[in-house]
Image (tube, rainbow, N blue to C red):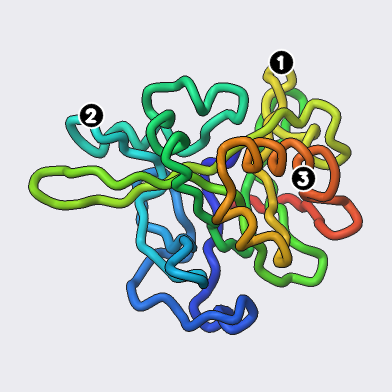
Amino acid sequence: MCANFKPLRPELSPILDLFPPTFDYKSEVYPGYNSPILVKHKNHMEWREAIFGLIPKWAEDSKISRHTYNARLETVADKPSFRQAWRNHQLALVAVESIYEPRYFNNKPELWAIERNDDQPFTVAALYELAQQHDELVRSMTMLTVNADQHPLMKHFHAPEDEKRSVVVIPAHLRMEWLTADQQIAREMLKELGATSSFSPDEFKAYAAPR
């Protein structure tokens, strides 16, 4: 799971071969905050502004985003909040510098940051939706997650009694393949990457990041 993250700073956009986003956003994003995401536009990637926490078309207001910031791969096709976006292949990427997860010591949570060893930004698999909210068209997104009970790095986070979950890193050479994937290919990519290269300890580091 991932409930907050540090999004890509605009000045680092050239690393992704992109122009900086043209809208403002906070240096740390929580559910309900706006965030830059990448979507497919024609034959390339473009920035869009999206609320962290998917707001389905039937939601009465945006408060649901506090509970829909992560979507489980195992149930994304069936959950009312996510199934339409998944069915419509509304895939996105979230460009981040760090994600944050709780690690428990003596049953007490401690916030840890997870970053690349080379401190470069990376992209995380997401799903987006467009919904009408009070006469305004609102874009929102959720990060997709897979089981991480056996993952060498991500298994160390979340409460001891909870299932371990992890968002999935989409590497640079697969970004467009992800954004253009159908449901079957997207599911296969998440399973494969989540079990192998995503958050590899050879490429990623984790450290305590107290507030």
Q: Residues within 10 Å of mark 1 (few under 14, many from 20)?
A: few
Asked whether 121 or 157 is in front, the reply is 121
Distance from the alpha carbon under mark 1 to that under mark 3: 25 Å
In front of the other: label 2 or label 1? Answer: 2
Residue 177 on image: x %, y %: 64, 57
Asked whether 101 or 74 is in front, the reply is 74
Residue 167 on image: x %, y %: 64, 42
Distance from the alpha carbon under mark 3 to that under mark 2: 32 Å
Q: Residues within 10 Å of mark 3 (few under 14, many from 20)?
A: some
Q: Which mark is residue 193?
A: 3
Q: Which circle's residue, 3 or 2, is located before the other in the chain?
A: 2
Q: Which circle's residue, 1 or 3, is located before the other in the chain?
A: 1
Q: Is residue 42 left or right of residue 117?
A: left
Three-letter code, disc 2: Trp
Compared to residue 40, the image places residue 74 above or below, namely above
Residue 93, by quadrant, is bottom right
Compared to residue 89, the image places residue 159 above or below, namely above
Q: Residue at the spot x=59%, y=62% of the render?
A: 96
Q: Label 1 belongs to which residue?
A: 161
Three-letter code, disc 1: Glu
Q: Secondary structure at mark 1?
A: loop
Q: Are marks 1 and 3 in contact (CB under 8 Å)?
A: no
Q: Label 2 belongs to which residue?
A: 58
Three-letter code, disc 3: Leu
Q: Which circle's residue, 2 or 1, is located before the other in the chain?
A: 2
Q: Is residue 197 left or right of residue 142?
A: right
Q: Secondary structure at mark 3?
A: helix
> How many numbered callouts?
3
Q: Residue at the spot x=76%, y=25% of the render?
A: 106
Q: Residue at the spot x=58%, y=41% of the render?
A: 2
